[in-house]
Image (cartoon, rainbow, N blue to C red):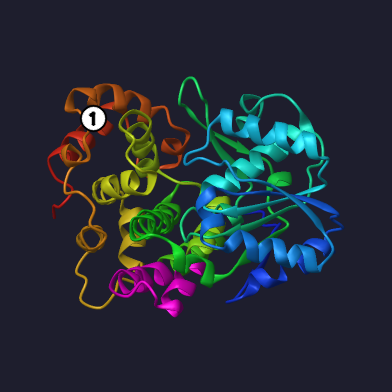
Amino acid sequence: MTGAFDFQPRTRIVFGVGSIERAGELTAELGAQKVLVVTDPGIEKAGHLELLLNSLSRAKIRSVVFDKVRENPTTLDVDACLQFAKANAIDSIIGLGGGSSLDTAKGCNFLLTNGGRMQDYWGVGKATKPMLPFIAIPTTAGTGSECQSVALIADEKTHAKMACGDHKAAARVAILDPGLTLSQPARVTACTGIDALSHAVESAVTRKRTPLSMLYSREAFRLCASSLPRIFQNPKDLEARANMLLGAAFAGMAIENSMLGAAHSAANPLTAHFNVIHGQAVGMMLPAIVQFNSVDAQAREIYQHLELPDGAKSLVGWLNEVLDQANMPKSLADCGVDGSAIPMMAAEAAKQWTAAFNPRTITEADFAKLYEQVFTTRSFQ
């Protein structure tokens, strides 16, 4: 039976080299007069912030800049952004940067318009009041946050990663300018690219998948799988960068309609306890999770129908090849993970919200076995 779904696109996508030049025009169309730009210092150094501010100025839109976003934002980051926003009487928000900037902007929007703390919005649909118009401008091809209505914010004290979702938090417009991704350092390109690839793979097989979400997952995988190795070979390949950025956005749309799975559940404790960068953490666990899920006949069939590059014999083998190209470590031990923490991480992974959507039921004991396997090596067949 074909899965039922209820699809309502909430985000206008403007894609193309130089499309950041349209930011002022697009913001003005939303009726904005004073906009808060949420970003980080690296984006300013790369010159992207100046492009945005110039476009806003040409459209006679006033702007203020909060540029203190940190990687993997916590409630502390959102609170700092919130206080800045309150002090500046803004009427719209633009997130410029990677997933951290976009999530911080969304988190600020929740609290500025609906009050309370981020913890109050952990879950789905808990905001009762309208939010300010939000425009997302990603500078990395990774999280796909520009096409999602969820803010991922960690609790500053417990480190629990809270998924705060509400359709009102979705960007009104996502501006996808491939030129902005050329400035990414190689390490950022690798980690964000692996993250986007994992989104395509995981969203394709979740229990919540639908015919619509699978269209986005498959196209996202095709674009990412054909482009990421090209970028590793030639970081200035603008066509590959464009396809990768579009693939990451499509993967974000797949997540919005399908959710994620066990690889993300296993990744979060690695980041929380051993500071393993999110994209690397997901990538390290993904081959083992794909092998685990392949016991499920439907998941196995979906994996087999993903469009692998010519010469690739299996999804697991190809994923490990790409991880090698990305210079990812060979094992969790090589990532600095302490093997004695595996029981604790397994218990935490089993409680992660994405685990519930994995196509094959996965328990704390299963996570422990997977961590033990990858602690020794991620490269297996």
Q: Is residue 1 at all visible to an observer of this figure?
A: no
Residue visible at 45% across and 79% down in the picture: 239
Q: Position of residue 287 (x, y in %)?
A: 25, 51
Q: Is residue 351 above or below residue 332?
A: above
Q: Residue furthest front?
A: 45
Q: Is residue 209 left or right of residue 341?
A: right
Q: Is residue 187 left or right of residue 336?
A: right
Dominant secondary structure of the residues highlighted in magenta in the image = helix
Residue visible at 43% across and 54% down in the picture: 199
Q: Is residue 180 above or below residue 64?
A: below
Q: Position of residue 269 (x, y in %)?
A: 35, 31
Residue visible at 71% across and 66% down in the picture: 54
Q: Is residue 144 above or below residue 87?
A: below
Q: Position of residue 190 (x, y in %)?
A: 34, 58
Crowd band around label 1 with a 10 angstrom C-alpha radius: few (<14), some (14–19), many (20+): many
- Disc 1 secondary structure class: helix
Q: Quadrant of residue 262?
A: top left
On the image, numbered disc 1 is attached to which residue? 368
**Magenta stretch?**
222-247
